[in-house]
Image (cartoon, rainbow, N blue to C red):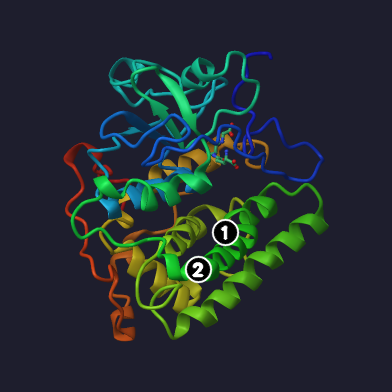
Amino acid sequence: MSGDRSAGEDGNAEYGRKKFRRSPSHFADRITADGRDGWPVEPGRYRLVVSRACPWASRALVSRRLLGLEEALPVAVADPIQDSRSWRFTLDPGGRDPVLGIGFLSEAYDARETGYPGGVSVPAVVDVPSGRLVTNDYRQLTLDLATEWTALHRPGAPELYPQDLRDEMDEVMDGVHRDLNNGVYRAGFATTQDEYAAACRDVFRRLDALTERLSGQRYLMGETLTEADIRLFTTLVRFDAVYHGHFKCNREKLAENPVLWAYVRDLYQTPGFGDTVDFDHIKRHYYQVHTGINPTAIVPLGPDLSSWLTPHHRERLGGRPFGEGTAPGPVPEAERVPEGHRP
Ligand SMILES: N[C@@H](CCC(=O)N[C@@H](CS)C(=O)NCC(=O)O)C(=O)O
């Protein structure tokens, strides 16, 4: 290895003239109530490392807020701009995460596996006592927060992965993953016209289908929020800011689709969703890091964010956002997204 740890799934070095592929998460240990992988759920033992720019990491930020796990699973926020050693803690005093004491997330990967040659990705969960990475498997992570961390959930936490809906949810989430969560990346990093066109069509075909599904019901699974909405939200909230321009998914803007634009604003305005979103980190990361597709690294000024807070009127569809539960409380002071990074 040359020491370049930035060449990940959506980094720069990995895409030449070949089909965009996302490499599977390498570290897939699970933190569970019974600790069967050696990692029991314990308050304060682990640190969730995220970039607020990253849609995969942002799922965990939303779940953690909705479930009230902020104290049990503290968070480290990486600088949205990676350097050749990948994610770094340059937002923290002295350029080090105050709890893990490291400057680069790669140090936790190395502590787990010496000479690990793969990309260093977020989200990542690190075991604080040993400083070792536990998992970077974003798919399982949020499901485990919902189903394995229950002893530490706040009173009134919603059920995000209800047993009786799992089959249907898995199917919905698979389609959303293939065509949207990952589809926008396939379009953005395509290196042939045909590959781009196919991916871009998949994106809008899926958005059309979701428009129909969401025109008569408030949330993806009906009247209550679930993990499926979280996974859709993290892509939709980035759509006009980065996927429309930077990834060329530009048949139309989300703001031109009345159903989905109202749906995503409804979520944005729901405690636990919008309060995790940092538009400055999102825009700077995509436009400045992916210099293969944006060689000048210029970050566009738009879009205007003020409309995110306008009335969405989706409450007319009824629904009980948190089911039997309640909305989460305010964002902990230290985790507030700075003014100027949000509407
Ligand atoms: N590792 C995940 C995806 C998570 C991911 O792609 N995160 C991005 C940020 S949005 C990242 O950390 N990329 C840097 C890298 O992989 O080197 C996977 O299994 O597909």
Question: What residue is pinned by disc 2?
Answer: 254
Residue 323 showing in the rendered view: yes
Q: Relative to 211, is 94 on the left or the right?
A: left
Q: Relative to 234, is 191 on the left or the right?
A: right
Lower sequence index among marks 1 and 2 = 1
Q: Is residue 305 above or below residue 36?
A: below
Who's the residue at 39% across and 44% down the image?
Answer: 280
- The crowding category of the residue bearing disc 1, from other C-alpha atoms within 10 Å (few below 14, some 14 to 19, many at least 20), is some
On the rendering, which quadrant does ligand 1 occupy?
A: top right
Question: What residue is pinned by disc 1?
Answer: 244
As measured in the structure, the alpha-carbon distance from the residue carrying label 1 to the one carrying label 2 is 9 Å
Who's the residue at 44% across and 51% down the image?
Answer: 143
Marks 2 and 1: in contact by CB < 8 Å?
A: yes
Quadrant assignment, res 80: top left
Q: Nearer the viewer, residue 296 or 34?
A: 34
What type is the residue that disc 2 sits on?
Leu
- The crowding category of the residue bearing disc 2, from other C-alpha atoms within 10 Å (few below 14, some 14 to 19, many at least 20), is many
Q: Nearer the viewer, residue 130 or 110?
A: 130
What type is the residue that disc 1 sits on?
His
- Where in the figure is residue 188, as x and y percent of width and height? 66, 50
